[in-house]
């Protein structure tokens, strides 16, 4: 049995990069972002992760503004508070949108050159979230705008896959807004599927966090062209030991949906909370994993933090990842 451990997205940047991120010239930025990526990859390897993501997103400041600034037809209006109590500069779609340059080719080229012993997973902000977090002054409907973003993301993924070349590339579609409008799950379904349509040689992931109702996602899983669902559970759970793990009860529902499908989907189980500095002990994480394995075949389980760890210190983030790996290793050893 091999329970794959994976990084979920962002990680806290070193001070030398975060304090000057927007003031560095292009040459200085590239040097510092590459240095921070290598340092973060080394940290992930020391923690024992199987999948290092994209090295903690050192090339990115924020998940919305980073791609939007590389799309024609969007005017940046100003800062608004985001879901994790940070700010991002919100844009308004004022004309037909088109990609003027790749969002993430610099990252994928650097990873291809420097990482050969770990799998990577590229997080890309999803079409529904880009639509929902933008003002719309041009398109007829929210669906039309979401599908316009889908076309752009599809082009981006194709370029990244072409750069990566041989071997399966993992692509994680980040959709924190996916369940915020329950009556728009048809838009989520159609726009996500269009963003990854007709692209061979990739493993598709969907990451949804901060959701109060995963049933909305579970209801459309049979029609989504997604291989792995990376979801948040630890934030809903208690931190004391015990057989009952209230934060993980939705895993049974996921399993029931999975049983209805011929092609089984995998579940990335969030086992550490990214909102708190409390470092979950190995015993607690092990109980969370063991509870999950009551409902899921180990071959269908990935282990990850609930979300990106950028709001925690690098020291706390590292320890959370290491304890996750240690808990996995204890389970494997005792089988």
Image (cartoon, rainbow, N blue to C red):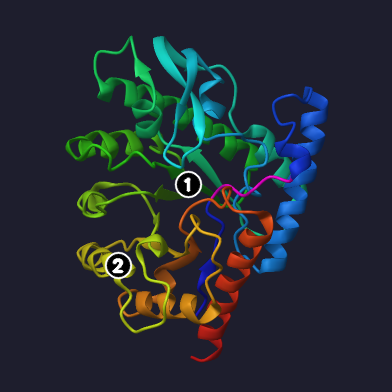
Q: Tell me which numbered mark, 1 or 2, is placed earlier along the sequence.
A: 1
Which residue occupies 52% across, 91% down?
334
Residue 31 in which image quadrant: top right
In the image shown, does 188 or 265 lie closer to the viewer? Answer: 188
Which residue occupies 23% across, 65% down?
253
Secondary-structure class at tag 1: strand
Magenta region's main secondary structure?
loop
x and y, in percent, of residue 80 in the image? 45, 26
The CA distance from mark 1 to mark 2 is 20 Å
**Residue farthest to the bottom, as pictured:** 334
Residue 178 seen anywhere in this rendered image of the structure: yes
In this view, 301 is above or below 12: below
In this view, 76 is above or below 274: above
Which residue occupies 32% across, 80% down?
294
Does residue 223 appear to the left or right of 112 in the view shown? left
Does residue 206 appear to the left or right of 22 in the view shown? left
x and y, in percent, of residue 109 in the image? 70, 38
In this view, 24 is above or below 296: above
In the image shown, does 41 or 92 lie closer to the viewer? Answer: 92
* Residue indicated by mark 2: 251
Mark in front: 1 vs 2: 2
Secondary-structure class at tag 2: helix
Look at the image and give the residue range highlighted in magenta. Answer: 9-14
Residue 20 located within the stretch drawn in magenta: no
Residue 201 seen anywhere in this rendered image of the structure: no
* Residue indicated by mark 1: 172
In the image shown, does 137 or 320 lie closer to the viewer? Answer: 320
Sort mark 2 into few (<14), some (14-19) or many (20+) by Cα contacts within 10 Å: many
């Amino acid at each position: 049995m091999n329970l794959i451990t994976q990084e979920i997205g962002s990680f806290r940047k070193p001070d030398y990069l975060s304090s000057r991120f927007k003031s560095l010239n292009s040459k200085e930025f590239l040097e510092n972002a590459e240095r921070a990526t290598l340092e973060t990859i080394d940290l992930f390897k020391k923690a024992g992760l199987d999948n290092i993501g994209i090295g903690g997103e050192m090339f990115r400041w924020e998940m919305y503004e980073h791609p939007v600034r590389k799309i024609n037809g969007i005017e940046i209006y100003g800062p608004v508070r985001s879901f994790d109590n940070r700010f991002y500069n919100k844009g308004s779609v004022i004309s037909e949108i088109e990609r003027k340059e790749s969002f993430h080719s610099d990252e994928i080229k650097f990873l291809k050159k420097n990482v050969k012993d770990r799998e990577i997973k590229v997080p890309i902000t999803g079409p529904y979230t880009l639509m929902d977090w933008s003002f719309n002054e041009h398109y007829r409907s929210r669906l039309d705008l979401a599908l316009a973003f889908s076309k752009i993301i599809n082009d981006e993924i194709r370029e990244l896959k072409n750069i990566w070349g041989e071997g399966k590339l993992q692509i994680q579609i980040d959709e924190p807004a996916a369940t915020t409008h329950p009556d728009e799950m048809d838009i989520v379904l159609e726009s996500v599927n269009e963003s990854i349509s007709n692209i061979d040689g990739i493993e598709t992931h969907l990451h949804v966090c901060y959701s109060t109702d995963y049933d909305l996602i579970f209801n459309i899983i049979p029609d989504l062209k997604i291989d792995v669902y990376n979801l948040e559970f630890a934030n809903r759970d208690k931190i004391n030991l015990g057989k009952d793990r209230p934060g993980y009860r939705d895993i049974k529902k996921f399993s029931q949906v999975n049983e209805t499908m011929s092609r089984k989907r995998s579940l990335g189980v969030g086992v550490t909370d990214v909102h708190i500095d409390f470092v979950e002990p190995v015993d607690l994480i092990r109980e969370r994993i063991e509870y999950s394995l009551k409902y899921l075949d180990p071959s269908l389980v990935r282990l990850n933090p609930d979300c990106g760890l950028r709001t925690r210190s690098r020291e706390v983030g590292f320890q959370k990842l290491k304890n996750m790996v240690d808990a996995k290793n204890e389970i494997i050893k005792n089988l």
